Amino acid sequence: MTTEAHGDGRIGTLGLIQRIGLFVLIGWLGLLVFAILSRSLDVDVLISSAFSSFCAAAVANATLARIYERGRLADFGLGWERESGRELLVGVGMGAWGGVLVMGIPLLSGIAHLEPVPSVPAHRVAALGLVLVALLFGASGEEMLFHGYGFQVLARALGPFATILPVAVVFGMAHVGNQHSTLLGVFNTFAWGVLLGYARWRSGALWLPIGLHFGWNATMPLFGANLSGFTIGVTGYALHWSIGPLWSGGEYGPEGGLETTIVVAALMWVVTRTGRR
């Protein structure tokens, strides 16, 4: 099935540059404006980042879809069809399964353990719920930015693989500035970009990659692990490793370790058998 807008695939080089340039400009300006607004309101960094990316992505996608397409959610991959709910749930399950593998195996083998942390939110359940909502908005925003209208137009004009790899490079480089970022962490983020882009192309919509993205991100704080350099202490426990950062990812979190490299490759294999367009 596919929820892509069909449009005219022969828009020409100038038309392609115009659409992608406008999409990037609106997205960048949106990120800047919403980030400044969040900081002025003294919003938590994680929540600010998540909602800024979502709002900027929504504005960029809606604007371009209204100008160049038919102004529908399907024009940037969010059209709802019979298979959409299943793809979203399958994606969440796959992402969570990957996170459980990365952290569950070390815990069961004894090379990692959970330790209580001194500062715990007063309302732990409410705090966890807020974090999960923020992570859902953040995952949706990033997917709309990197695999929404701009990705769709490039894939129509250049083909899927000439689009997936360059966009994945940009996705990886966008995380270079994160706290405690490492070379392996950036590479793993690039690999995640390839996986998410491939899931987007294969399913023809954003629901599968949003599910994958959110399922993975949501699992990290549940195990007390850092997420792309962010420390999210909502469970009252922190994950500590007795092995070096090559496998644990160090302060960047499990995304900076070799385990994630292996799990992303496994998830790619699973996606090749899931959600055919």
Image (cartoon, grey):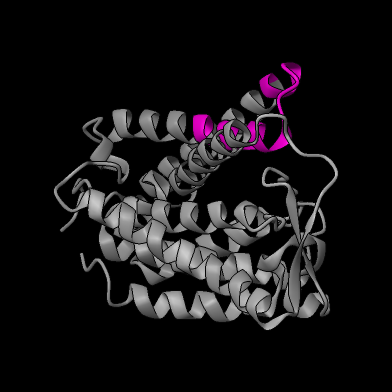
Q: Is residue 262 magenta?
A: no
Residue at 51%, 29% (x, y): give it. 55
Residue 235 shows up from this direction: yes
The residue lying toward the viewer, choosing from 261 and 244, is 244
151 vs 62: above or below = below
Identify whether 226 is placed above or below 166: above
Q: Residue at x 32, y 52 (%)?
A: 88
Q: How many marks?
A: 0
Residue 102 at x, y percent in the picture: 60, 73
| Residue 244 in the figure: left or right of residue 143 | right
For this rendering, which residue is in front, 254 or 79?
254
Q: Residue at x 67, y 47 (%)?
A: 235
Q: Quadrant of the C terminus?
A: bottom left
Tell me if residue 163 can be seen: no
In the image, residue 207 sits, relative to residue 31, either above or below, namely: below
**Residue at 67% across, 38% down:** 46
Which percent across, then down, holds residue 253?
Answer: 72, 62
Where are the magenta residues, as a range? 37-56
Front residue of 197 and 212: 212
